[in-house]
Image (spheres, rainbow, N blue to C red):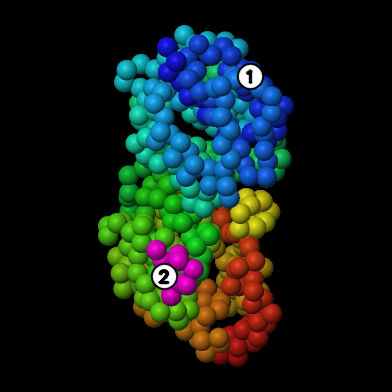
Amino acid sequence: MKDITAILVHYSDKTVLQKALTSLKNVNARLESVIVFQEQGRLLEGQYDFAGQLQFITVKNNYLGNTLNATISRLASLYVLLLQEADYLSPSISAESLQLPDEKTMLGTFYRNRNITLQRPLFLRTSFLKQEQFLSSHQLPFKEALFPARFANVENSVFKDGLLKQARKNSSTNTVERQAFIQKYQLEKIKPDHPSISIIIANYNMGEYVENAIASCLLQNEQPDQILIMDDGSTDGSHDQLKRWSDGEQVTVFSKANEGKAKALNDLLPHVTSDFILELDADDWLDPDAISLIKQYLSDLPKDISVLYGNLRRWKQLSAEADVLFKGVSQGVAVNGLEDLLTYRFPLGPRIYRTSILKKEGGFPVVSFENGRLYEDVSVLSQLIKRSSFCYRDFTVYNIREHRESITKMNQSKWQEFLKMLRSD
């Protein structure tokens, strides 16, 4: 009985793809079709086996998730076999050995690279895949996160070792850093606990990236109490993107005329009901364990501390269509006064504010410099450090995306002028 569709994604060259296709011969008796998703500009068509069964689908602009959703919705086969990157089936697998017990929806295996172990979905019921959509590329930090974000902690799954082999393993710093991030999707889900924390986001024309920021908040192993988003008069259509995420419960989206980030964040403050606030820029994203790790540090934070912060992981956005490249981790240091803050080597973050103190101090100051449209983070921190203390802890859960459209990057020349204004106050 031909009841399996094999789907292959993220293959980089024809030699590796040929090895994966050859490994499918052991299950050919059950293969209804084989579909290879290839990236635009990296075409893999050639002379392969499975004549009449093999189909190539070109994914435009890295929208693999959307293309997979459309393709899977049309499948008639009972099962889907997933292969990715450089994977190929172990020779021990036969058509008869690919089985799922009645109560199970997924058979998975493990991929290991250095000290990282990743769960790999391998054999799934098509009906299960049709129930929930894959995220699109602009909702994820990089393409390798597509399957881990979708299949983390799937109920009724079973995992076995040794079902897959790899034609090659990539151990570059960029790849290993991505895999370390992806591994966090597999963390056990935790029920919300005190202290409570909300995430606030101000968006202005970040349609390419803001859904990645929101998705990263929802893919946490411990959920935030609130996700509050203000669209600050965007003109790129991103407000319509944001509205699709608003559920009126955990995620709430607001909009206003464009007046700058400080005013946008201030308009969110009255809606915050949590003990602490995590500020997330619309073009950045969080690790899947950000909330649970931050809460560990908040649980015994002294009452006079207004801001908790840590380290920043930096990524370079090569272009709007391309993936990100890992640059490194900016290690935080203690800030003990205004001058320490003003000479900090990079943006202080992630910034977790104690809600009561932030509201008592009037929120984010709208300073005269550029009418509060620039450096709102330094403005509020310089106000808070005069009346309270900050706390640094050595943790890294916040990802900064460096790109050409960054408002701060486009206004670097104004930084010294801004510092002069702060020191004169």
Q: Which residues are magenta?
A: 231-240
Q: In what quadrant of the picture does the C terminus appear?
A: bottom right
Q: Nearer the viewer, mark 2 or mark 1?
A: 1
Q: Which x, y percent locates residue 229?
A: 39, 65
- The disc placed on residue 49 is 1
How packed is label 1: few (under 14 Cα within 10 Å), some, or many (20 or more)? few
At which x and y percent is residue 145?
Answer: 53, 42
Q: Position of residue 28 (x, y in %)?
A: 54, 14
Of 374 and 328, the residue lying toward us: 374
Left or right of 230 in this view: 270: left
| 315, above or below 154, in the image | below
Disc assigned to residue 225: none
Task: Kindly identify the amino acid type of the residue bearing the numbered disc 1.
Answer: Asp
Residue 65 falls within the magenta-colored stretch: no
Residue assigned mark 2: 231
Q: Who is closer to the viewer here, 334 or 251?
A: 251
